[in-house]
Each structure stands twice: as structure tokens, then as C-alpha cells.
Image: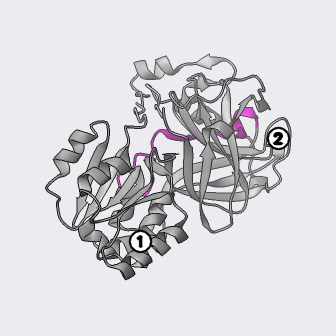
Amino acid sequence: MNAKDRSWDIKDFLSTLAFFGEIPFLGSFRWVQQWLGQSPKVPGMMMAAPDPKVALLSATKPAWMSNLQRHLPSVTFQLYNGVEVEDLLAIKKDEPSCAANKLSTIDTVVVLPDLAVALQKSAIAATAKTAQRPLSKFVFDFTQPEFDISPWGSLDDVVMGGISQGRFALSQAGKAQAAVFSGVISTDNSGGFSSVRTRNFEPPFNFSGWTGIQLRVKGDGQRYKFILRNSGGWDSPAYIYSFDTVADEWITVTIPFAEMVATFRAKSVTNAPAFDPAQVFSFQLMLSKFEYDRRLNPHFSSGTFSLEASSLSIFRPRQSVPLVITGSENKTMKGEQQLALADAQVEYRLIELGHGALLDSLVEALT
């Protein structure tokens, strides 16, 4: 329905209040919902950053792995034996690959001799490309067939008398499923925003040790907001990050926690505490006529809108040297390895075979 044909809808208003269990500016009646069994608590997760992880890429299983763990007890080692060169080449082309998925949460990638001797320059460059990326971990993977979207609900300007209307639903986006935030936005009745927000997670998510959020989205060219809250209160301070989309193109939006702007009732709060990743109660996506402090959104247009999201992840830098690779004993191959590593512009350690035991060299490189 065209926004011009709509009027303020009390049903939308009451539906929003019922979903979130709140009356704006007055208070919560979630206890009534819980008493009636209509609003079960939605638990968050403890996702604090773990100890450093090291991936050992090998064609076979090394016999000395247990000794390496004894030398470095604070490091978590994960062996990936049977890795094929084709898996690594798929990384360079940004294709989904077994290797790329496995290495997304690894601090250091170690390529052992039995695999290193088979690597050509292009495969080394692909492995280094993975090592350049920050670590990431899914919070919401909207592509999963069994993804539960029920904690997400529409929160539009109907609560302020407006007539905008948005929704959040799972949809098939090409070959993969995505969550789609879409609808119609109008500035009539002093409105001008549409959003989707989660119910509060109790207990909240704990992202201690992580640096920020990454969104994988495809938009319509407009500027959207991503919003987090450190408090379970409905009318509580919000931490906002605005991001521009490219029409009909998938992009990764990187949102450092340190760059999120503290706001209260759409006004920035200059003396607010820094965002605390240890207690994240709710998530929100919004399209609004305004940024904050009454500044206009420079990339906003009323009418229909659409933002597809495939995932929401947390990320952090790697905790140690990203790449350790075993140098080939063949001089020509070794020269190609060194050129590939130099071109990759990633911090690395090159282990020289024939100069001391491999185990000792690995301990030194990872310490």
C-alpha cells in the first residue's frame, strides 16, 4: 500500500506495544506478558574473546603436536590435516571454501612442511589474504535454514503518530537466504522512521575482548542506522552507527564499538560512558529522516525501502603474528614463497628447514 493511502493505525500501534511489552515514556508491562506466558525471555550468549587460536594446516597429522601444546599451554591449537591447495585458492577468489570458514576465528595460520612444499605462489597469496582479515564470529547468521527471527519486531514511527511501516522477514536472496528489512516510509504526521529491533536479551550478550560488529548487507543506496543498547530499559541511551549502502550490491559494514555515538531521544550525549561490549541487551536497524541532533540524513528518501542482511558478526584483530609458513628447501620455490609473502603485505614468520628442529622453530615463532 502506498504511504499516501494510509492513515495512523491503532492496530499497528497496539501490536508494537504488545510485542515489546512497553508503553513509550510510561513504562514496561513485560511482567504481565511473562505471567501470561506470552513473552518468554530470550537469552543472549557469552561470546567473550577466547585465548589465542593457532591453525596448523597440514596434508597429514604431525606426530609432535602434543609436544607443541605442552610448550605453549595458553594457546589453543587446531589441526586441519587433509587440506588441499584448491581450498586455499578458493580464498583468493572470495569463493566460499572449507578453509576460509575454518580460518575465520584463527589468530595464526601455520602452514607445515608437507603442505608448504606443494604450495605455489598463488596459493600462498591466498593463505596470506585470510591472515590479513580480522577474526570474526557469527552472532546472527541469517542464511541458516533454521534461523529464529522471532526476537525481531517492527518499531516504526506509529508509536509517535506516524504512518511508516516496516517488517523483517526471512527471504530467499538469490542462492542464499537473507533477512530483509523492508517497507514504506513517510514523513507525514511528523513521522519519518522505520526500524526493526530485538526484544531484550536476558541475560545480555557479552562481547568482551571483541572490537566491533560487521554487517553483511545489500541495500538501496540509502543511509541506515545500526543501534545497540547497554541497558534493558526501553527509553535508555542508544549507541548508533550510521552507514551508507550501495544500491543492489553486497557490502561489509565494519562498525568499531569505539566509533558508536551515544544518543538519548535522538540527541547525542557528549559525556556518556563508552559503549560496553560486555552487556548488549538489544540490536536495531533503522531508516530515518534524521541522523541525531536534528541533522537530516543526507541519503534518505521517502517511499519504499529495502535492506537485505546475510549476517551480523563480531570481529577483533589477531592476537599474534598472522602467518607462519615453512620455507621450501628448493631455492626456486623458496624464492616464490618469499615474493608471495612480500606482495601480501602481512606480518609473517618464515621457518627455514634445515636450521634447527621444526618444533623449536614453531615455539619461537609463536611466542
**Which residue appears farthest toward the left when viewing the image?**
63
Q: Please give the name of the residue rendered at 23% of the width and 43% of the height, measured from the top-left corner.
A: 69
Q: Secondary structure at mark 1?
A: helix
Q: Nearer the viewer, residue 10 or 53?
A: 53
- The kind of residue tagged 1 is Ile
Report the disc number at residue 124: 1
Residue 273 on image: x %, y %: 67, 23
Residue 84 on image: x %, y %: 28, 72
Residue for badge 2: 189
Q: Is residue 142 magenta?
A: yes
- The kind of residue tagged 2 is Asn
Residue 310 on image: x %, y %: 50, 57
Res 187 visible: yes
**Which residue appears farthest toward the right when viewing the image?**
295
Q: What segment carries the magenta color?
A: 141-161
Q: Please give the name of the residue rendered at 63% of the width and 39% of the height, measured from the top-left corner.
A: 227
Magenta residues, dominant SS class: loop
Mark 2, Cα crowd under 10 Å, few <14 / some 14-19 / many 20+, is some
Sequence-first disc among 2 and 1: 1
Q: Secondary structure at mark 2?
A: helix
Do the residues bearing badges 2 and 1 touch, measured as CB atoms within 8 Å? no
- 222 to the left or right of 295: left
Q: Is residue 319 magenta?
A: no
Mark 1, Cα crowd under 10 Å, few <14 / some 14-19 / many 20+, is many
- 284 to the left or right of 172: right
Q: Nearer the viewer, residue 110 or 234?
A: 110
The number of numbered discs placed on residues in the rendered structure image is 2
